[in-house]
Structure formats: C-alpha cells, structure tokens
Amino acid sequence: MAKKILVMSHTTVGSTMASGGIRAYHMARVLQEQMPEAQVTLAISRTTPSDLDPATVPFAFERFDGNNLGQLARENDVIVSTRFPIKMIPAARKSKLVLDLFTPLITEWVELTKRDPGRQHRRAWIDFKRRDLMVQMSIADTILVSNERQRDMILGVMGTMGMITPRMFETDPGLERLFKIAPIGIRPATPIPGPPRLRGVIPGIGPDDFVIIWNGIIVDWYDIDLLLRAVHRLKDKHPNLRLFFMGTEHPDSYGTKTLEGLGGGVTKRAIALCEELGILDNHVIFNFTWAKNDDTQQYLLESDMSVCTYFDSLETRYSWRVRYTDVMWAGLPLVCTEGDIVADWVHERTLGVRIAEGDLDALTGAIDRLVSDREFYARCKKNMETIRDEFTWEQTMAPLIEFCRDPSTSVVSRTEQRLPVATRTADWFASRVYYEARFGLKRKVATIRKDLMAKYIFKDDTMS
Amino acid sequence: MTDILCISLGPVGTRMAAPGIRAFNMARVLQQQVPGARVTLAMPPGDVSDIDPVSLPFAITQATGAELVRLAMRSDVIVSGQIPTGLLPAAMRGRFVLDMYSPLVTEWASMSRWVGKRHRRALLEAKRKHLMLELTVADLVLCANERQRDFVAGIMGTMGMVTPRQFEGDPSLRSRIAIAPLGIRPHEPVQRANVMRGVRPGFGEDDLILLWNGTIIEWYDVETLLRAIAVVSQTRPDVKLVFLGTSYPQAKSGFEDKSMGTGWVTVAMELAEELGILDKHVFFNHGWADPETTEQHLLESDIGVSTYYDNLETHFSFRVRYLDLFWAALPIICTQGDVVSEMVASRNLGASVPASDVDALAAAILRLGDPSARDVCRRNLDVMREEYRWERTLAPVIDFCTSPPPRGPEKRDRYFPLAYRSLDWAISEAHEKLRFAYRKKFLRSGYSGME
C-alpha cells in the first residue's frame, strides 16, 4: 500500500514565504521526488491567504481547519509539522508524528514578545506556549532540529520532562532515532545571473562598485551600528564600497506603516546614524520593501560579499539563519560575528572572516581584507561554493526521507508516553484556561467594545 | 565579609578523585581571589589523616546533619555539586551555585544498570526531580563546556526558570549558566627519578611510550587501542602502552568488579594476551596511582591516549584525564566526538581519530611517533595549559562571589515552583523508596534470617 505523508505548514506557502513556509514546501517537494510511490500532501490552514496554484506543484495541496483535521490525521501514515493542533492528537493515534523544531522556540518567544507592554500577559503567554511545546514533544515520534546545539538543548528539555527513558537509551544510545538533524537547505534554482537588477538599476550602485549585501531583515538583535561605523571608516580608502540593505521589514509586518513593523525602529535609527556619518545613499543604500524572491536571487548574484553582525545571545547560538543558506547558494564570502554554527565554519573552512562581538577594528579589517586581497577573496569564494553541495534540500532532508521510508524505526513507545501525554495535555489546558480567562476575555471585550463604538458612535477612522 | 561554603561530595586528601579535587580547588581559588572571603570546605566523613588543616588557607569541616545545616545557614554563598534536601532552606536563604560539571542525566542512565528495570526508572525519576529542585534553587549553574550549557539551557527553559526579564538583562544567559571546567594541577611539573624509561623491565631509554592516564570502564574502547598497538608494534618495535591506575578510589568493594573497572581490566588483559603484546608492548599498573607516581608517568611519556565510543556520553563529556595531559603538555591521541577532540584537531594538540577505527589510530600513533611532530603539539599545549589554570576556569564563580547579590524579588519568584517541585520530588522519592529500596532491604533481611 502506498504510504501517505502529510506536511502541515502554519505559515503561508506561495510566492511570498517566510522560513516556515519555505521549509514545508521543500519538504513536500523532496519527499515526493525521493519517494515517488508515496502520496505527499501539503496542507495549510484554511484561513491563511495563499496564491499557490495546486496544478503547478508536484504534490497534493490541501487546506486544513478544525473540521477536517481528524480526517487528515487518520488518513496519513506520517505527519510532519511544527505544531500538531491539540484536536488532532486523538485521531493521530496510528500515524507517526514528526515534530519539526527547526527554530529554538524557547529563546524566540522571549525575543518576539519584547514589545509586549503587559508584563503579566507576556509571562502567561510564554508559559502557555511552553506547555504547548511540551505536549508536542510528548506526542512526537521523532524530532527534527537544525543543528547539534539545538539537539543538545532539546535533549535537556526532554530529559527534564522525563521523556528520555532508560529503555530509549539502551535501544538507541546516541538517540539518533529520536533526534534528526535536518537544517533548512539552499534555493534549488541554479545560481546563474540574469539581467541586472542591482548594479546600474538601484541608484547609487554602479557596475564597478564593491557591493556588500545585508541579505535579510533588520531587527534589534543585529548590530547595525557597528557595521555602519566600519563602512564609514573605510569609505575614504575604498570610495567604491557600497553597503546594500536588501530589505528592512519582515513580510508578516508588510502593510503596516513603512518602518513601523517588527524591527522598524532599528531601521530608523540606522538611517539617522548614516546621515550623521554622511554615508547615506552614497555608501549605504536601503531597499525599503521586502525583496521578492527573484529580486533576492539577482541581488545576491550581483553582490561581492555578505555581512551579518549581531549580539551574543542564546538565540544566536542555536540559530540557523536562512540568510546564510542564501549566501552559500550565491557563493559569497561572508563576514559575520561569532556565536552561531556558521560563524565557526567561516573560521575553520575559510569562508570569510569571523569577528568578535562589537569589535569595530576586526570588522573594518575583515572588510578591508576582502576588498583589497584578491587572492584571499577568491579562496573564500571557492570554499563557499564547495559548501553549497552539502546543503541542498535533498541532503538536508535525507534523515526525514529515511524516517518516512521506515517509520517503525521510531524509538518512542506510545504506551510509555500515554501518561505523560495525558498529564501534559491537562497542564496545557489549565494554562490555556488561565490565559483566556485572564487576558483573552478582556481583549475580546475590548475589541467588541471598540468595534461597536466605531460603528455606532464615531463613523470615521479616528478610533483605529 | 563573604562566608562561602564549598561542599565536596568525594574524599579530600592525597587520594582525591574529580569531585574532591574540584571542591578543594574551588575552596582554594575562592579564598585567594574573592576579597574578604571566609571559605569553609565541607567533606564527607572518612579518613582525613593526610590533610594538615593548618597548612590550608581555608577552613575544613566534616560536619554532617544538623551541624552542616547550621553552617550552611550562616553562609552567604554555597557551592555544591548536589544539595542534600536538608540544605535547601539554607540555599534559598543565601546564594547557591550548583556545580554540574558532569552531565548527570546521561550518566545515571548508564550507571544504574545493575538495578531492575522498573526500579531503575523510579530511581532515575526521583533523581531527575531532585535535580530540578536544585536547579530551581540555583542562582548560578556551572557546566564544563558549551554543549552541556545547551543542555542545561534546555532544562531551565522547560522549567520556566528563564524569565523574560532575566533574558533581557543578559541575553546570553552567561550570568546564570556559566562554563567552568576543571583546572590543571596547580603546581609546575617537576622531574623526579625515572619510573619507566630504563628502569622498568622491558623499557628502553628512547622507547615511544603511550600513556592511558585513567581508569578503564565500560565507556572506554580499549579493544581498538590494543589492536592498533599490535599493528604499530610491527613497524615500531619500541612502542609501549602503559595503563596507569586501573581502579577508582571511591569504588566500594562490592561493586568494584562490575561497575567501576576491574572487570574491564581483566577483559583488556585477556585481549592483550591473545594479541601477544601483554608485557611486551602493553603494561598494566594495578590499583590507584598516588600523585607523584602519576605525575612522573605523565612527564616520562610521549603521548597521552584515550579511546572511547562516539555516543551521547562522549558528546557531552569533558574528561578529567585530559587535564593532566594539558598539565604535562603531552600530545593527545583521542577519539572524535567530544569537545576536547575538536580542540585537538583545530589547535593541533595531537590527533583525533574516528571511533573504532584501528587503522586510523595506528596511523596517528605512527605520525606522532616522530619527535618533531610532537614538539609542535607540545608548544600548542603550553598555550592551552595557561587557559586551564583553576583561577581561569573558575573565573565565573569568582565573579559571582565578588559581584553584589542581585536586587529585587528574584528568590521570592521561586517559592511557588520550589514548593510544587518539592512535592513532586517527595512523591517520586517515596515511590522509589517504598516500592523498591526498602522492600529489597526487607526481603534481603528476611532471607538472611531464614538461612
């Protein structure tokens, strides 16, 4: 009987995709390609807008909602998702669940809620998310992570929860059947430059300039100040040096007032600093929208190197930045701050230069070296191009494919997990009730009140 | 004035193993480096005839029970690897440093193999809950390397012990979970009379001596090493492998055979015999070597070797034996998989080879058989050595003790989690004790009564 595999995405899949969507899309694609006998379905929520044309993709495309979740769960042998809706769990008794933890959620939540003014609300929200994650981990048959560090952290999580039983250790001492390392892969398109979209097109960037690309968003865990100061120091020595910020906003915050989305404040500060240093528009060029997929590829291929500077934090340590997979794809030498796993490779495999956090001299020196030392530049570029083949989606998703081929290799025992799943679900439910009662209702009442007032009292937009 | 209490879980004195050595040096370094510190080292009851309390810069005590609790209540900072339940109130009152330099969770899983399956699960459950209790109380958690730190960060995150406020103040969480590995012997190496070269039967002056400076237990892969030695001896007839010390000082006579090494020594000796290299190329020292003997062996050898399996235990470990190799600047041959093997490769301290690969290991031994190759490694190790002085490795603890205690209701936030984790632990502990431990004891006494 043909195997049925379901890949669920909680973010949109289509022409604009964030990392979650990209990942789900390529998982479905690679699974279908490598297992032609299987029936792979990609499902996104019914409420998520998407312009994906089901006829153009090699796999089946579905929408899920509360009504068909149970059916989907029963129909499929393997389900891959970053989160399994609680409703789905009872129906998924017979399916194997692959939990995709490609981002270290625990540190991410803290960063995401930074701007939440209500301290109590923030704590309750994080607490609720944490309990939800625990339910997810208890029901998973195998877990995908991006790198060894994440694995180590999640092992700590599961160890604390008592989910690593002696039996598991004995049958699988390396826990390789429980955790699988499957990072985000590189773009499948071949890196061949097309007609220019950067040089000679975007004002300020000429054909002979040395272009440093910042190929990602700007948010406050990046150290933009340092980079701008380095460019300022180098501008007299290398008058053709250009720093190009490919985008400033996150696609999810698109449509909100320009520069006011997630991380918008940082962009404003960066622009102010550029003006102060006198490098705005002549050495530093901002692109104020989120670059479309085709543009991104072309920008990367027309650039000379990439740079990324940030602050030391746990978030950095576990991260696997999508922007780096793009840098690998385009084969660009990279200058980056130490802290994550790619930074270590940059140093060990000479893909560019790794610098210490906040070290302006080192950053200036690194960029200067890549601009002036052609031999070093060529070596970095060559090394970066060899790393590309290690991170095709086919390679990175190999552990997932292997699992889908034989899901019985899972080391998790459903009978052993019965009690933990029950207690954790109860725990989750309790914190959900608390959260809804304390904040949800209040918020709902406030929204309804606001709607009513807008409708019947003020007929204009002043309330919004 | 800062009153600091360091609690040692193992014996202190000339026959110290890692827990004792660590507590001893912790006390020493804190006394020297923290201004106005008054350090007391508490150690388990036992023979202390070889310690001279007058020569020590800090106070020592063998207090137990109520006396230890009283002592702890008077301390501002308590440093310990585990904390007896009775000391929890004291740890909540003062500031508590949890010294988790070995990743217990994986260790328990492999070490408690001799008990029954259900009992083992209950035992691990109780231990795990006790650890969570300790982590709830801890103000600073120490681990030995970045990988352990990731593991602990996961634990603390799950427990909800990383509050947004704390994360914002220190996004790297280094002030809460710090890296403080073991340090090297504090004194400089001194050459004494030879114990091997030209002295021990079968040893020439210029032999290539490989040293296994530790015990042999189930985690180590001696087989691959012996086979590699057999291969190397074909081309280098002067190769010698010495096993220094084969049993653990704390090993209780009852368990000695199985859990702490001796059984594995017999297996290794049988294999060496079979390969025809025993007492020709492979030599076993029995018992636990005293410090002078150990040091002299280290200084006389050419290469320090350690082979094991590439598993999770290895992944998280920071093996104590490496520190002696750093101390003696002895080039290292080791199996890939742990943090040190990465340093060996990236900083050229010797050679790291894939697990269970006899040919690669033999090739590495032959490569480092060349004195000029060893000299390069030795120079790199001299640099490394300075980074592993106790004063350097324990720097986070020194910082913690010298910096003022954090303001605000940090500890108060933890009363509720502490209460329910105590309850949680008490239930598991009671379950384990009543269902397995006491029953076993009862049964045993019943049988002996019948005999």
Image: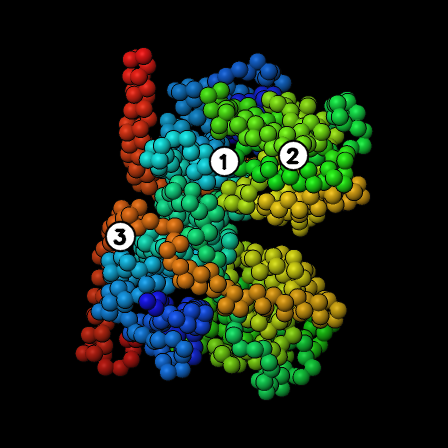
In this view, the residue in front, A55 or A240, is A55
Q: Secondary structure at mark 1?
A: strand
Relative vertical location of residue B306 with respect to residue B38 in this rendering, above or below = below
In what quadrant of the picture does the N terminus of chain A appear?
A: bottom left
Label 3 and label 2 in one chain: no
Q: Of marks 2 and 1, which one's residue comes earlier in the chain? A: 1
Q: Secondary structure at mark 2?
A: helix
Q: Is residue A271 visible?
A: no
Circle 3 residue: A425
Which residue lies at the image location 33% right of the left edge and 26% below the top edge?
Answer: B437
Q: Amino acid at mark 3?
A: Thr
Where residue B275 is drawn, which disc sits there? 2
Circle 1 residue: B99
| Labels 2 and 1 touching (C-beta < 8 A) | no
Label 2 and label 1 in one chain: yes
Q: Position of residue B413 (x, y in %)?
A: 35, 43
Per the model, the C-alpha gap separating discs 2 and 1 is 43 Å
Per the model, the C-alpha gap separating discs 3 and 2 is 58 Å
Which-is-in-front pick, marks 3 and 2? 2
Say whether residue B346 is left or right of residue B182: right
Chain letter of disc 1?
A: B
Q: Position of residue B140 (x, y in %)?
A: 48, 40
